[in-house]
Image (spheres, rainbow, N blue to C red):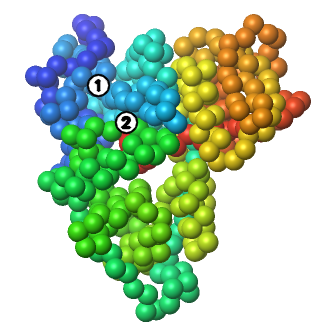
Amino acid sequence: MEEKIAVGRASEAQYEELMGVLDASFSFETEHDRFISLLPKLYRREYRPWENNICVFEAGRIKAAVGLYYAKYDVCGEELTYGGIGNVGVLPEARGKGYMKLAMNAAVQEMSQNGTDFGFLDGQRQRYRYFGFDNAGFCHIYQIRKDNLRHEYGTDRQTSLRIEPIAAQDAQALDFVYDCNLAREMHSVRSRAALHDLLLSWHSQPYALRRGNEIVGYYVLGDDGREVREFTLRDPADMKEAIIAVVDSDEASGKNFVFAPYQHEYCDFFFDICDRMHVAGSCKLSVYHYEKVIAAFLKAKALEHSLQDGNFTCLIHGFAGDEKLEISCENGVPTVQKTAGTPDLELTHVEAENFFCANHSRHRRKLPHGGAGIFPLPFFLLTQDHV
């Protein structure tokens, strides 16, 4: 007898079933591993994860699920809508039936038709490139060892700052973190009510940096005890004392600090004292509204350095439809607009993502003028905002 297959959202009554399917799909068995511990910001009941999962059902039972979590992203005052893809899982006994493909295609179709500007995810590159996602954006990672501090500041280095974990009831510290995120030129729009759960996600721990009763900064430390996933100070003048406090706070030999390239004050300081620095990708991106996304992130690109003047026309065969755009920069001011002109370039969906957002694109070398000098776009997503 042929199994009855359906694709859609789960119901609230299926919350426990959904969580069991997700944990089983990833072979999560311990409390530490389970999705509710890994990502409390998404999977606690009060956040209604059944509304954010596209499921494949056999006779009414969940066999596979793809999380699709919508949020807003602010780029220099331009608000974009994104969909974060996570928990792509199929029960072991249901694999090989194409259920992951069914759910992923449903998620991509929904985003490409409902006005979502871009989607993102993490995962194996070729697996998700079939669905339009590819490497995008980048971040700077600075390795600061205790030996670096010894040479820079001596063995008797001191700090007036103390470190305290940020608890759920610490409204002062959480308000500070919330305001710091809003002040970033590029940021996901976070829920204040869910902020503590967000900071704990990915097995992270948030800490406040205090001088007396004053909060001077905060940071988020990964579960390896080495990766500082967020680091923000009220006043950059406290950088030296903050680095000493954080790096000397435990027995680890050092810490790795992650920043967006446009965060010049932090990048300049950390580059001067780091042991080494490298550039890493941010995530995998799929753009559904190229005109809006390119225009917004070009504003962010201008934060890094002066943009090179030039112009070109590009025809993009995107997942959400064709877009023919003229992209120009005059006196360092970029513009993006629809055009009927003959394109200088014609790109597929993934080729366009590489051209505009990846660290490497063979198509950028094809332009006969300087227009390509303003790419790649500086897409960046903090770890705590990943899904």
Label 2 environment density (alpha carbons within 10 Å; few <14, some 14–19, many ≥20): some
Instruction: Pick the residue in front: 261 or 122.
Output: 261
Please determine whether, in this image, residue 248 is positioned above or below residue 47: below
Q: Residue 189 carries which label?
A: 2
Q: Which residue is drawn at 39% across and 43% down?
A: 182
Residue 218 place in picture, x, y as percent = 34, 61
Do the numbered discs 1 and 2 sit on residues whose CB atoms are within 8 Å? no
Is the C terminus in the top left, top right, bottom left or bottom right quadrant?
top left
Nearer to me, 141 or 39? 141
Residue 343, placed above or below residue 163: above
Q: Can residue 197 be seen in this view?
A: yes
Residue 344 drawn at (x, y percent)? 82, 20
**Number of the label disc, if any, that sits on residue 53:** 1
| Image x and y of residue 138, in percent | 58, 47
The residue that appears at 74% across and 37% down in the rendered structure is 332
Q: Please, what secondary structure does the residue beneath circle 1 have?
A: strand
Instruction: Tell me if 337 is positioned left or right of 157 in this view.
Output: right
Q: In this view, does 229 lie to the left or right of 336?
A: left
Taking the image as shown, residue 328 lies to the left or right of residue 219, namely right
How many marks overall? 2
Q: Residue furthest left?
A: 13
- Tell us which disc is closer to us: 1 or 2: 2
User: Dot 2: what SS?
Assistant: loop
Of mark 1 and mark 2, the one earlier in the sequence is 1
Residue 279 picture location, percent across and down? 61, 55
Residue 159 position by quadrant? bottom left
In the image, 79 versus 247, the foreground residue is 79
Depicted 268 relative to depicted 171: above or below:
below
The residue carrying pointer 1 sits among few (fewer than 14), some (14 to 19) or many (20 or more) residues within 10 Å by Cα, namely many
| Residue 371 visible, this orientation | no
- Specify the amino acid type for callout 2: Val
